[in-house]
Image (tube, grey):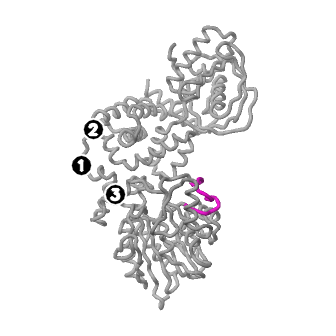
């Protein structure tokens, strides 16, 4: 029997699934981790996948420099194994000889024993002499050129900070369920378990952990005392300002973090419809609400096609956390840099405008729509809203806040700012007189 | 000692049934030594004699990380099987292929050691799976036989192609 798979070979096959088949890291990594029994190998696999994706453009350029012939598409796992080896030599505290010999040995596990000499030569070469790479932003910032260009034009003063933040590790942040326990009390419970955290100054229920832990180590996680959620995502509830007795729609609710937060923080009762297009992801909304002891009406349907799910009773407030490029959460999902294409952005913006148009008639006169994305591109944020306001009977209600920066419409948070992911929020109020 | 050549699927010789060892003599001792060296070199955690084209009922196993737990089973027989578990397996005769196989979760096995002395052992987890995987070889069976026909066909094609490339 062959030795069980090791982290290095598995990192190469995991990255292969992302690069060749377009699967997302968060989709495939749990499956890959399952295949390893040893906890040390499991964390190595995770580190290798995140590390290679964060440094992909630079590592890929080094590999291309050393590979004299391009590698066949079906052998791309060998190229990715080279990147895994290079990443260990460049960034990890792995003894160089171990990084080389274990990466070479991984060729057997991939069924590509013929590549051992090639992998060995590239990695040894790299140890001997530092590569001379062209001076290009793509390699310097480890992002695709189109993304860098877009950020430069959107944020001429901040683009390089955003790119740097995208390549940094994100902290694990918690949202304490105020229906069950207060933040200060929960923080003490964490301390008793030697989990260090600090309270966010920006979001009232947020705790940021000094180092990440398994959720099952969190006190009373199963009992719904706490959820894992970025601090930036925890601003939706306060921006929406739901009041007791109101009827509210969360139009793209999965996995349900923002909907749950609304229910946890509102004083009194609200009537909440949690809508999502994906039945499988809607199950996660149900599971989350159940764990937290909260209730909402979960609806499956397309937010862009209200006749198929709406009962005709208008809403006081609508939260549209729109599908987007996720360019603000690259630090948590570094695969976005490879999976997203330049041409996706216009298509997403079109979809966002369509959702705004479709949901607007569902809002009561005087009602409030909150538009949110986890993008940092103006094309997905203020531009569709500026367009929208020209066509509809609404006006912006400015968000008065300490966080982020005011845009022409709405507020933008950059990734890494006050430990948050990159988010965008805007409030549009419907004119009371019209219908 | 010598490193022996490992047969690769779909080599028909892997389908032979191995004959029991009558006498554990010096020749068998030499085979066991060579098999250990071949297995460690591969690297693998188990090897059956049939995989090195010796159709006799001999297997060697070492699931440790540091070659510290060598086990030799001659004429092994499983005398008890309990429970079921699924584990991902790979095989030195089917390089680069890993897939899940369901096997008994705990087994009792009787065999002769490399000095010809009988022993009984209970094994579970990776060791239990490995013993079952190697005993299958002695009966001409491979882990890919547990997979769907479609998967097996795909693996066979891949292996045949690989062989043509390396010849």
Residue A300 disc label: none
The answer to whether mark 1 and mark 3 are in CB contact below 8 A is no
Q: Chain of mark 3?
A: A
Give above or below for B45 relative to A390. Answer: above
Have a look at marks 2 and 3 and say if they share a chain: yes
Give the residue number, with chain letter if any, for mark 3.
Answer: A163
Is residue A223 rendered magenta in the image?
yes
- N-terminal of the pair, mark 1 or mark 3, is 1
Where residue A206 appears, x then y in whole percent?
51, 65
Q: For numbered disc 3, what is the local secondary structure? A: helix
- Residue at 32% x, 46% y is A58
Q: CA distance from mark 2 to mark 3?
A: 24 Å
Q: Is residue A66 visible?
A: yes
Is residue A208 rendered magenta in the image?
no
Q: Residues within 10 Å of mark 1 (few under 14, many from 20)?
A: few
Q: CA distance from mark 2 to mark 1?
A: 15 Å
- The residue lying furthest to the bottom in this view is A433
- Which segment did they paint magenta? A215-227
Give the residue number, with chain letter if any, for mark 2.
Answer: A130
Residue A135 disc label: 1
Give above or below for A317 relative to A302. Answer: below
């Amino acid at each position: 029997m062959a030795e069980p798979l090791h982290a290095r070979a598995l990192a190469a096959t995991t990255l292969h699934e992302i690069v060749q088949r377009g699967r997302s890291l968060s989709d495939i990594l749990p499956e890959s981790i399952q295949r390893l029994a040893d906890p040390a190998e499991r964390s190595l696999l995770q580190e290798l996948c995140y590390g290679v994706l964060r440094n992909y453009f630079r590592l890929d350029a080094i590999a291309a420099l050393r590979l004299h012939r391009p590698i066949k598409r079906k052998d791309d796992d060998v190229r990715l194994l080279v990147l895994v080896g290079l990443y260990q030599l460049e960034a990890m505290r792995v003894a160089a000889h171990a990084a080389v010999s274990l990466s070479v040995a991984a060729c057997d596990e991939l069924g590509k024993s013929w590549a051992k000499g090639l992998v060995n030569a590239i990695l040894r070469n790299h140890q001997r002499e530092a590569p001379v790479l062209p001076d290009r932003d793509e390699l310097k910032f480890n992002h695709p050129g189109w993304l860098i260009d877009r950020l430069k034009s959107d944020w001429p003063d901040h683009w390089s900070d955003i790119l740097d933040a995208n390549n940094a590790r994100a902290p694990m942040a918690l949202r304490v369920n105020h229906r069950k326990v207060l933040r200060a009390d929960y923080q003490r419970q964490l301390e008793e378990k030697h989990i260090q955290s600090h309270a966010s100054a920006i979001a009232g229920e947020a705790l940021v952990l000094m180092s990440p832990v398994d959720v099952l180590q969190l006190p009373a996680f199963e009992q719904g005392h706490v959820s894992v959620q970025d601090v930036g995502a925890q601003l939706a509830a306060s921006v929406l300002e739901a009041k007791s007795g109101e009827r509210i729609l969360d139009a793209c609710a999965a996995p349900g973090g923002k909907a749950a937060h609304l229910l946890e923080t509102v004083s009194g009762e609200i009537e909440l419809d949690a809508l999502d297009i994906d039945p499988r992801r809607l199950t996660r909304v149900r599971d989350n609400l159940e764990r937290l002891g909260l209730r909402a009406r979960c609806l499956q349907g397309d937010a862009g096609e209200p006749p198929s799910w709406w009962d005709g009773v208008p809403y006081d407030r609508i939260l549209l956390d729109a599908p987007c490029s996720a360019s603000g959460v690259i630090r948590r999902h570094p695969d976005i840099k490879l999976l997203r294409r330049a041409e996706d952005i216009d298509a997403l913006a079109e979809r966002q405008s369509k959702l705004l148009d479709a949901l607007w008639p569902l809002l009561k006169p005087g009602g409030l729509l909150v538009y949110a994305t986890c993008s940092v591109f103006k094309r997905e944020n203020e531009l569709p809203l500026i367009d929208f306001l020209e066509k509809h009977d609404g006006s912006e209600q400015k968000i008065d806040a300490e966080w982020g920066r005011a845009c022409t419409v709405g507020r933008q948070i950059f990734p890494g700012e006050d430990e948050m992911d990159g988010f965008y929020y805007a409030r549009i109020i419907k004119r009371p007189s019209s219908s | 000692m010598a490193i022996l050549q490992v047969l690769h699927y779909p080599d028909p010789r892997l389908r032979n049934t191995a004959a029991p060892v009558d006498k554990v003599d010096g020749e068998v001792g030499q085979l066991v030594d060579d098999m250990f060296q071949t297995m460690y070199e591969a690297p693998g955690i188990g090897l059956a004699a049939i995989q090195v084209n010796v159709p006799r009922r001999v297997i060697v196993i070492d699931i440790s990380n540091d070659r510290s737990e060598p086990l030799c089973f001659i004429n092994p027989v499983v005398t008890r099987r309990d429970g079921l578990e699924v584990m991902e397996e790979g095989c030195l005769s089917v390089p680069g292929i890993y897939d899940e196989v369901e096997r008994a979760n705990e087994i009792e096995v009787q065999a002769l050691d490399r000095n010809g002395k009988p022993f009984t052992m209970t094994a579970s987890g990776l060791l239990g799976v490995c013993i079952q995987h190697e005993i299958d070889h002695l009966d001409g069976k491979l882990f890919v036989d547990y997979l769907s026909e479609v998967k097996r066909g795909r693996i066979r094609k891949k292996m045949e192609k690989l062989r043509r490339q390396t010849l």
